[in-house]
């Protein structure tokens, strides 16, 4: 019985040991699989790292990928306008101040308002002429009396001339009657001259427009007493013509000529009016070193004398190479641009700048226009550096 018990215990221990060994084997299998996965992942990352290093090494090696790409263009030659800008005040080109030309008196009517168009000789205002009218009537009566006396003297002379042949009247009587007739005619002319003078004075009592134009201001009202010392009562713009009087620097005036086209833009509006320079000041202000250019403009309601406006005057035009500002470089040696030679290498070219406009910078000298000029990234280039050109179409 004891033996059987020992055999049975031994068998149980063997069975327990077998089970433990199986568990340990499975555990080592899992550990081995995990190690294999870790090693595979490490190998994968090592291989990728080597590939990236190789790519970086290839990029770092001298070759095509290190050559910069720049934008270039063949600018050619274009018409470049010389534009002068300035500001100034609008005014009537020919302003006509109108006052009292005659004796004056009390204003009875004002017939126009500012903004009215008037013709030459048109009455702007009337002055009371009641006293002058009576004087004119009296002189008219004097003319009629003198004319009657002249007719009577002529009749007496005619009758005397018929009787002189029969000896009833002497030659001396004929001479006296002839003289009387002549005196009567002279008195007629005197009376007529006096009447004409009075009529002319009376007509001058009316305030009239000296020429056709636009009424700008009115400085008189009915009932006002006016005389030759009353000053300006109306201001007219002859023909409604306007102008811009713009102040320009001395150097700009030297380039201007009469007839130069101009565009004027009043302040507060985007509307542009075309005109031309009709006069360039013959003098320069010694204090400001400026002069006045006068630009003639046709009438428009938006052009109000006294208003402020800007002007753009085309003083001339030339053929020149034009480049954007980004293509121009500067250093201690002056202005320059980069062009590309046949090997696509940067070549420094000194240039002289001309007019600067909305179209770009005109090149006065240094370029012929058929070169490939670097438009951008010129500040990062060096002479002789090789580049990849990106040719921009010519505009």
Image: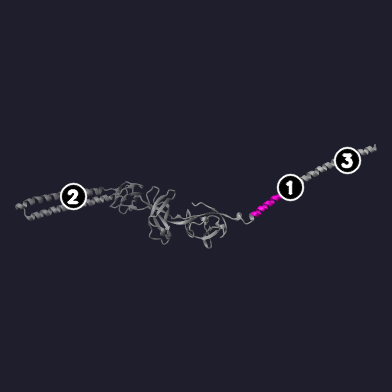
Q: Nearer the viewer, mark 3 or mark 2?
A: 3
The residue wearing badge 2 is 143
Residue furthest top as drawn = 1
Residue at 61% x, 56% y is 63
Left or right: 352 in relation to 211: right
Left or right: 11 in relation to 109: right
Which is more toward the observer, 243 or 198?
243
**Residue 115 spot, x, y in % from top left:** 36, 47
Is residue 16 magenta-colored?
no
Residue at 95% x, 38% y is 3
Which is more toward the observer, 184 or 67?
67
Q: CA distance from mark 3 to mark 1?
A: 39 Å
- Answer yes or no: is residue 168 visible: no
The residue carrying pointer 1 sits among few (fewer than 14), some (14 to 19) or many (20 or more) residues within 10 Å by Cα, namely few
Q: Badges 1 and 2: C-beta atoms under 8 Å apart?
A: no
Residue at 66% x, 55% y is 57
The residue wearing badge 3 is 14
Left or right: 26 in relation to 305: right
**Residue 113 spot, x, y in % from top left:** 35, 47
Q: Which residues are magenta?
A: 43-58
């Amino acid at each position: 019985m004891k033996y059987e018990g020992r055999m049975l215990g031994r068998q149980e221990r063997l069975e327990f040991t077998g089970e433990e060994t199986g568990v340990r084997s499975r555990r080592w299998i899992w550990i081995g699989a995990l190690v294999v996965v870790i090693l595979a992942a490490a190998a994968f990352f090592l291989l990728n790292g080597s590939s990236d290093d190789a790519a970086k090494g290839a990029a770092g090696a001298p070759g095509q990928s290190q050559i910069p790409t720049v934008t270039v263009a063949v600018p050619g030659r274009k018409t470049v306008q010389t534009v002068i800008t300035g500001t100034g005040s609008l005014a009537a080109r020919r302003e006509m101040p109108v006052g009292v030309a005659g004796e004056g008196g009390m204003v009875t009517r004002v017939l126009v308002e500012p903004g009215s168009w008037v013709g030459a000789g048109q009455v702007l205002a009337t002055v009371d002429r009641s006293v002058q009218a009576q004087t004119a009537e009296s002189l008219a009566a004097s003319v009629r009396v003198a004319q009657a006396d002249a007719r009577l003297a002529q009749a007496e002379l005619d009758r005397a001339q018929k009787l002189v042949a029969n000896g009833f009247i002497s030659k001396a009587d004929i001479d006296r009657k002839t003289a009387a007739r002549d005196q009567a005619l002279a008195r007629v002319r005197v009376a007529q001259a006096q009447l004409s003078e009075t009529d002319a004075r009376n007509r001058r009592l009316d305030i009239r427009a000296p020429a056709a134009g636009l009424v700008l201001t009115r400085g008189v009202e009915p009932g006002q007493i006016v005389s030759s010392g009353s000053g300006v009562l109306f201001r007219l713009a002859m023909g409604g013509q306007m102008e811009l009087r713009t102040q320009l620097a001395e150097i700009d005036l030297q380039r201007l000529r009469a007839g130069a086209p101009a565009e004027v833009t009043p302040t507060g509006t985007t509307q542009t009016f075309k005109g031309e320079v009709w006069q360039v000041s013959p003098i320069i202000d010694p204090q400001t070193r400026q002069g006045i250019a006068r630009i003639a403009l046709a009438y428009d309601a938006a052009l109000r004398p006294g208003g402020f406006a800007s002007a753009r005057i085309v003083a001339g035009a030339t053929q020149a190479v034009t480049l954007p500002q980004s293509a121009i470089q500067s250093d201690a040696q002056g202005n320059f641009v980069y062009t590309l030679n046949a090997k696509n290498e940067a070549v420094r070219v000194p240039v002289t700048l001309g007019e600067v406009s909305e179209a770009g910078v005109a090149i006065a000298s240094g370029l012929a226009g058929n070169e490939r000029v670097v438009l951008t990234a010129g500040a990062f280039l060096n002479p002789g550096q090789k580049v990849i050109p990106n040719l921009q179409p010519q505009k």
